[in-house]
Amino acid sequence: MKKLIAIMLVTIMALAFAACGGKPQNSGNNNDNGSGQSGSVKETNAAVKVTKAPGSTVTLDGSMLGVLQKVAIDNSSKDKIDIKGLLITTDSGHHDYKPMEELITEGYKTEGIYDEFMLNEWFSVYADIEGGPVNVYIIPNNFKNEISLMKAVDLAAISEKLEYPIFAGAVTPDPDNHGFLLSAYVNKELGEGLYDIFFTSGEKILYVVQLKLVPDAE
C-alpha cells in the first residue's frame, strides 16, 4: 500500500512540473526549430546590462556602436570564419550618405562602421570574410542572457517571434559586388532603439555589431 501511494505522489509531482513549464530559460537550446524561446521580444529596446562569461569582451550597452565584436572565443580552425571588416551603407538619401564607390576606397572596417539608420529605409551590408558561409540575424537589443553564453538557436528563436524578422541564411560575400552580403528593409513598425547584427555559423555566434534605429525624417 505504501509503495502504491509513493508511486502516485511521484506521478502527481511530475504532472505539476510539466504544467508549470519545466524548461530552462533558454528553451531555444532544446528545440530544433528554435521556436521554444519564451517571453516577448517587444518588451523594450533598452540595453540590458548582464554579467559577462569568463573571457568575454562583448559589450552591447550602446557604448560600442559601429564596432565589430568577436563573440565566439573558441572559433576553432576546423570551421574558422574570420570577418576582417564590414561596410554598412544606405542609398535612401535620408542622411549623410556616401556612395559605395567612395566607401570601398576607405576599406572595410572593424570600427567606425556606420551605425545609425532611420526607420522605413533600406541598408546594405558588405563584408570581407575568410571562410563561410554565415547566417545573419538583426535583432532588437533586449536580451536577458549574456550573449557569449547563448547559441545560434537562441537567436533563431528570438527572430522567429519578431513580427518583422530580418534574417539571411548561408550567405557569402559577392566578390563581383564589393563583398555584398545582404540588404535589409527597416520597417517603421520595428521601433527605434538599439539593434544588433549577429553573424553565426552552426551553433556558434561568431560576431556582432550594434547599430541604432532612429525615427523616419518624413
Image (cartoon, grey):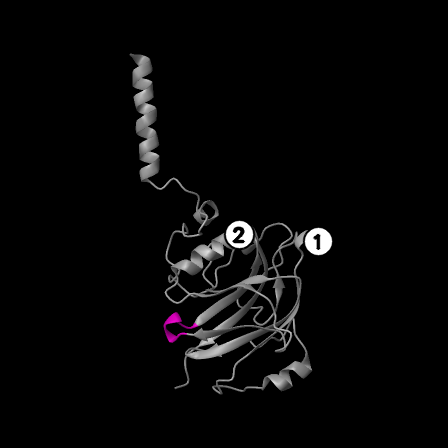
The answer to which of 130 and 155 lies nearer the viewer is 130
Q: Residue at x 39, y 67 (%)?
A: 164
Q: Quadrant of residue 84?
A: bottom right
Q: Where is residue 22? Give x, y as percent.
A: 38, 39
The residue that disc 1 covers is 77
User: Label 2 amino acid?
Assistant: Met
- What is the secondary structure assignment of the residue under circle 2? loop
Q: Residue at x 60, y 62 (%)?
A: 133
User: Label 1 amino acid?
Assistant: Ser
Alpha carbons under labels 1 and 2: distance apart: 21 Å
Among the two numbered marks 1 and 2 on one chain, the one whose residue lies closer to the N terminus: 1
Asked if residue 188 lies in the magenta stretch, the reply is: yes
Q: Where is residue 176? Give x, y as percent.
A: 63, 77
Q: Which stretch is magenta? A: 187-192
Q: Residues within 10 Å of mark 2 (few under 14, many from 20)?
A: some
- What is the secondary structure assignment of the residue under circle 1? helix
The answer to which of 85 and 53 lies nearer the viewer is 85
